[in-house]
């Protein structure tokens, strides 16, 4: 009996390692499933990141196209506003960095004055409305010729005159709704000439106001 009993116990001993093996296999498959699930989640997250980047890129493209369209409209509007004026006294140019409107001082101010003429106010109001469509920084520069100020003039030098004229234009823009934080007024006196100061024509070219609007990249 004892031998037969011992045989039954021995025959049941294999169940222990078999159960351990099944447990190990179950854990193995659970781990594999976990890795696969994590991998799928990782790929899904990566796909989401790619899609978000593509959508962001599309939005950037649409924004740039909208900016280009508004810039084109602004340029067309300004060119229309300058039509009919003496082309020797006005200029409009566009490059990769800015729009620039150049107006001869004679069509805006009387000699030695920084007070805008009535017709100049009307013209500048239209230009300002066109520039207001774009949210870019705006700079107005005043320039003079090299002739000395007449004794007793309101402005002791061309520095003061050039700054006062630039500020007069900025003040009009702001009064008509241009955000003040966008605006800067600069005066260069006669130190950035575009013409010769020893000829009447050259001096007339140097007496000017330049309105520059920075373009968006």
Image (cartoon, helix red, strand yellow):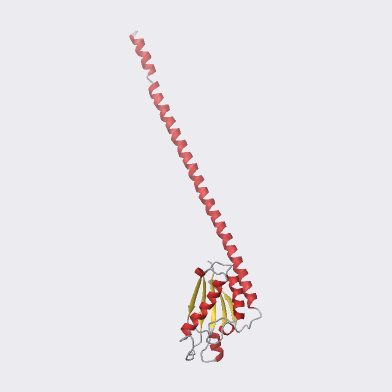
Residue situated in front as seen by the camera: 213 or 48: 213
Residue 152 vs 177, above or below: the answer is: below
User: What residue sits 43% from the left and 33% below the top?
Assistant: 28
Q: Position of residue 72 (x, y in %)?
A: 61, 69
* Res 120 seen here: yes
Q: Position of residue 170 (x, y in %)?
A: 53, 75
Q: Position of residue 11 (x, y in %)?
A: 39, 17
User: What residue sits 54% from the left and 77% below the top?
Assistant: 169
User: What residue sits 58% from the left and 65% below the top?
Assistant: 67
Figure quadrant of the N terminus:
top left
User: What residue sits 40% from the left and 21% below the top?
Assistant: 15
* Res 191 seen here: no
Residue 68 vs 188, above or below: the answer is: above
Query: How many marks overall?
Result: 0
Residue situated in front as seen by the camera: 124 or 205: 124
Q: Position of residue 189 (x, y in %)?
A: 48, 83
User: Relative to residue 56, is residue 25 drawn left or right?
Assistant: left
Corner quadrant of residue 209: bottom right
């Amino acid at each position: 009996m004892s031998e037969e009993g011992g045989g039954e116990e021995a025959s049941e001993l294999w169940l222990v390692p078999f159960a351990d093996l099944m447990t190990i296999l179950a854990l193995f498959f659970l781990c594999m499933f976990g890795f696969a699930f994590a991998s799928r989640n990782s790929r899904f997250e990566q796909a989401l990141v790619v899609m978000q980047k593509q959508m962001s890129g599309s939005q950037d493209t649409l924004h740039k196209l909208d900016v280009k369209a508004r810039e084109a409209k602004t340029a067309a509007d300004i060119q229309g506003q300058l039509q009919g004026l003496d082309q020797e006294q006005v200029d409009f140019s566009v490059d990769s960095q800015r729009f620039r409107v150049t107006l001869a001082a004679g069509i805006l101010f009387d000699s030695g004055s920084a007070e805008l003429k009535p017709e100049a106010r009307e013209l500048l109001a239209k230009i300002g409305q066109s520039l207001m469509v774009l949210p870019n920084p705006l700079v107005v520069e005043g320039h003079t010729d090299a002739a000395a100020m007449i004794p007793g003039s309101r402005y002791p030098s061309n520095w003061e005159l050039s700054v006062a004229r630039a500020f007069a234009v900025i003040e009009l823009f702001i009064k008509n709704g241009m955000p003040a934080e966008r605006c800067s007024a600069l005066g260069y006196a006669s130190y950035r000439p575009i013409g010769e100061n020893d000829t009447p024509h050259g001096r007339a070219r140097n007496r000017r106001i330049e309105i520059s609007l920075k373009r968006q990249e």
